[in-house]
Amino acid sequence: MRKSLGLLGAALALFGASMAASAAKIAIIGSGNVATALGPGFAAQGHTIVYGSRNPSEQKVKDLVAKTGHGATAVPQNDAVKGADIVVLAVPGTAAEQVVKSLGDLSGKIILDPTNRVERGTADGYANYGLAATIGSNAELIQALQPRAHVVKAFNTLNVKQMIDPASSGGPLSIPIVGDDAKSREVVAALVKGMKLEPVDLGPLRFARVLEEMLVIWANARSHGAPYNYYLRPEPKQN
């Protein structure tokens, strides 16, 4: 009996060590809607969240820290990325480049990019993608600014409500993921699963423009009375 208890204790200790090893320090840059969705969701998975804010003492930031719990903190943006394993750009797509420039060297870190670029105010009422075809994507612009970081595009093809409450969509939700580093895609896929969403690995970062354009047609459908959500149903395995 004592031997069995000893083995059980060892197994539990090993499990605890494994959980601790998988926990990451995640810097979330911004304190708006996306940060409010992802921060608490990642904290609930056992990760340490530090919000990078231009005004960390602002009441709404304090409220977000309190909502997040699990030892979350808020500091200036440059301080948030120090020692972080993952940096989440919870900022407007048009501001992402400038924010990334201001954060210093992010070599070796995963940069999780949920941003989009949308050109609104068109003559026919259908928004366009906000970057010229020769530019590529917001994610690739970010990667060019931080060539030794691992940019992963994800969480850009749904709204904040469904990030927080996937069941509100009425069914399963897919989160397409792209990035040049396969291990970094796996890390982000685990975060996606922890949010009760379904990751779909679509390969290298050069496909990020496709994901960003997926958001544009998603938004157009919603604004013209035909809302939908993305679920990429896996094909059954053939015997």
Image: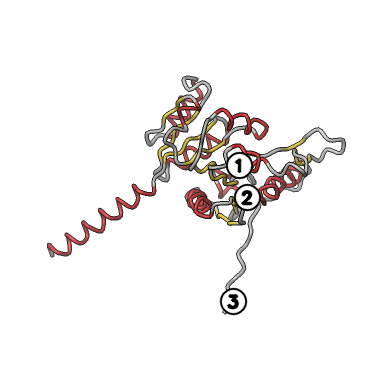
Q: Amino acid at mark 3?
A: Gln
Q: Is residue 143 left or right of residue 134?
A: left
Q: Give the tally of numbered discs.
A: 3
Q: Amino acid at mark 1?
A: Gln
Q: Residues within 10 Å of mark 3 (few under 14, many from 20)?
A: few
Residue 213 location in percent, x, y? 72, 46
The residues tagged by marks 3 and 1 sit, at their Cα atoms, a distance apart of: 38 Å
Residue 186 location in percent, x, y? 50, 54
Which quarter of the figure has residue 24?
A: top left
Is 146 in front, or is 93?
Answer: 146
The furthest residue to the left: 2
Residue at image coords 75%, 39%: 131
> Which structural element holds mark 3?
loop
Is 41 in front, or is 105?
Answer: 105
Residue at image coords 59%, 71%: 236
Q: Nearer the viewer, mark 3 or mark 2?
A: 2
**Mark 1 highlights which residue?**
143
211 in relation to 78, above or below = below
> Which structural element holds mark 1?
helix
Is 67 in front, or is 91?
Answer: 91
Q: Earlier in the sequence, mark 1 or mark 2?
A: 1
The residues tagged by marks 3 and 2 sit, at their Cα atoms, a distance apart of: 30 Å
Q: Earlier in the sequence, mark 3 or mark 1?
A: 1
Q: Are the two marked residues, 3 and 2, in contact with CB atoms closer than 8 angstroms?
A: no
> Which structural element holds mark 2?
helix
The furthest residue to the bottom: 239
**Mark 2 highlights which residue?**
205
